[in-house]
Amino acid sequence: MKYEILGKSNIKVSRVGMGVLPIGPNQRALPLDEGASIIRYALDRGISFLDTAQYYKTYPYIREALKGSCYEPVISSKSLCVDYSSMEAAIDEARKSLNRDVIDIFLLHELRCGQFEERQGAWDCLQDAKAKGIIRACGISTHDLLVTSEMADVPECDVVFPLINYAGLGVRKGNGPGTADEMIESISRCHASGKGVFSMKAFGGGNLTANYQKALKYVLEKQEIDSVMIGFGEIKDIDDLFDYIDGRMSPDYNPDVSQKKMCIEQSDCEGCGTCLKICESEAIFYNENGLAQIDEGKCLTCGYCAAACPVRAIIMY
Ligand code: SF4
Ligand code: SF4
């Protein structure tokens, strides 16, 4: 495993990080010890960068994985909150739940186009937390290439966590879709201005997993991306990754995705209803929050809804 410094932040991370979301209650809902053992396995193999979020409810897995170990991975968390006091509470929750005085990286989670001003309170809180030394770096996660580009000109922003994959699945450009090339341009701007860049959704939320090696090659070849965050839900996912980066993978190997399930990321869904119209199995319904949700009993995992969702909130895991 290679290691890189995230921009000017002085934070050293593994070239591939572990997204912890898949083991948690929003996806596989693994028992605590099983989920923790997957994190521990990733750490044993040299992964030193973990991505979590207030919304993922995965702090207990990380805490359990680190209990009694000598590992001190870089932990990045984030919150969807808007105002100062909610962000203060989110940082406090992370510090307590992870049993850490300092959280390495804290982000505005899923910053959408035109939303930066609206979330200024939360952003101010991140600046204050950094000044107090309870976070080391702050930044944003986003699917939007305009937001990514905007961050290149924000001096207080240390790191960006944008979405990128070879097919451009889920890349947003304001109210419409953007392309992978356009997102790479925005990422390059951030990289050139000294921001640390770590990327998400190399497999387009599972929709590109059938082209596993092509998807990994694309992101790992980009020098402007310091680290690539990959969600691991089982040990085999980690073994596959190392087989690929160590050159042991047969060129025609792709993981079996036949047992995968579909799920709608509630933090990403905008409730537009497109997927409800597309699904002929009537497997999608609006939940009590007005957001789309999948009835696993009816879903045929055809993937049509995922292809139609404008914000790529529908993932396969
Ligand atoms: S298409 Fe996407 S954003 Fe629209 S309701 Fe479905 S999951 Fe949500
Ligand atoms: S994967 Fe197919 S069956 Fe399942 S919810 Fe989406 S469109 Fe419906």
Image (tube, grey):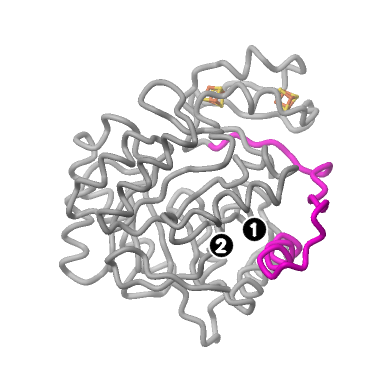
> Mark 1 highlights which residue?
232
**Helix, strand, or loop for circle 2?**
strand
Which residue is at 41% across, 55% downward? 224
Horizontal side of residue 214 vs 78, given as left or right: right
> Mark 2 highlights which residue?
18
Task: Give neighbour class at mark 2: few <14, some 14-19, many 20+ (Cα, 10 Å).
Answer: many
Residue 315 location in percent, x, y? 63, 37
> Which one is nearer the viewer's eye here, 91 or 301?
301
In the picture, which quadrant includes the C terminus? top right
Give the residues drawn in magenta, as a range.
236-265
> Which one is nearer the viewer's eye here, 51 or 284?
51
Check if mark 2's residue and mark 1's residue have beta carbons within 8 Å: yes
Ligand 2 quadrant assignment: top right
Q: Quadrant of residue 194?
A: bottom left
Q: Is residue 302 above or below residue 183?
A: above
Residue 259 location in percent, x, y? 82, 44
Q: Disc 2 residue type?
A: Met
> Which one is nearer the viewer's eye here, 74 or 91?
74
Horizontal side of residue 214 vs 96, given as left or right: right
Q: Disc 1 residue type?
A: Phe
Q: Is residue 261 magenta?
A: yes
